[in-house]
Amino acid sequence: MLGRRIFMIIVTGGAGFIGSCVVRTLNDMGIDDIIIVDHIVKTDKWMNMRNKRYIEYINRDEFLQKLDSFDGKVSHVIHMGACSATTEKDFDFLYKNNFEYTKALYKFCTKNQISFIYASSAATYGNGENGFDDKNDIKILMPLNGYGYSKQLFDLWEEKQALKPKQHVGFKFFNVYGPNEYFKGNMASVILHTFKQIKEKGYMGLFKSYKEGIQDGKQRRDFVYVKDICNVIKFMLNNPEVNGLFNLGTGKARTFYDLAVATFQAMKIEPDIRFIDMPDSLREKYQYYTQANITKLRDVGYHDDFYTLEDGAKDYVQNYLMKDYEVY
């Protein structure tokens, strides 16, 4: 367990979706010696910080310049900051922001022999033709977009390092949803899009299927609630001997149709689901199925139950979205 602490925890992306929820989890653990690193600019991410306790906010670009000044003062770096847009076309930007930045933090943690916990992505699995098993050789994976490849590059680089941080844990997040994602626009979860569309139009439009054998709305993903993400990160903080690259999903794929129905039910509205054309730009790079194999996570001792899709949707919709987008 984390005992009395004299060092700081750095949370990159700490004003963002998952990062701000991690800060909330740390606060709930009695920890407020936190440095939040992010790139807020003109977004509303700052609203995710208002109910958090932390020492200082530092801009993402300025932080790297100051990194050496934190030598000997930090116990953990929880690196959730990245460009997470799967539609981002500027690969030079993705390479610098998602790969080079992560390398710099990893080297800092290695030099100081402290814990490094970072976000990889299930996007590294591509179309899933090689499965979704985090015990397999990651070199065979073929991501479908630049975002996934930028994450894959770091996973490959990390694997080859002879010198590593005291603790090094990566998470391949599957389809995360929950409070504090409100600023993400098109990249927000389908639950948030469903909630908004029901409010505006009274129905939800789901993409048609363009794959033989898969019905409209029956595309399946592993939807994982952000509170489960935080619980697993808390587990890693309390078990510093655990290292590795782990899938982080529920281990149970559900359909988009199930998700839409769960959202309607949480809003106590009769489901009205319609099917719409998928944009041509998405059809060739669309994942029809993802499901995390979480055996590796279970094997290191994480045995808590994950939220079901219905329970997660109910908590998210009723306790956050229907309360004027309350911040967690």
Image: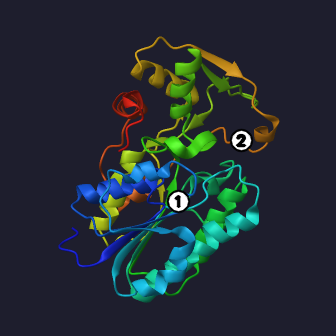
Q: Which one is closest to the eye, mark 1 or mark 2? A: 2
Residue 164 appears anywhere in the view: no
3D distance between C-alphas at marks 1 and 2 = 21 Å
Q: Position of residue 209 (x, y in %)?
A: 71, 28
Q: Position of residue 221 (x, y in %)?
A: 56, 39
- Residue at the spot x=41%, y=46% of the render? 226
Residue 161 appears anywhere in the view: yes
Residue 155, located in which quarter of the rendered image? bottom right
Closest to the observer, 190 or 32: 32
In the rendered structure, which amino acid carries the disc numbered 1?
A: Asp
Left or right of 314 in this view: 245: right
- Residue at the spot x=27%, y=66% of the render? 238
In the rendered structure, which amino acid carries the disc numbered 2?
A: Tyr
Residue 241, located in which quarter of the rendered image? bottom left
The C terminus, quarter of image: top left
Closest to the observer, 240 or 119: 119
In the picture, the disc for residue 134 is 1
Q: Check disc 2 and report the residue beneath it.
A: 286
Give the vertical position of 288 relative to 25 (above or below).
above
Left or right of 247 in this view: 256: right
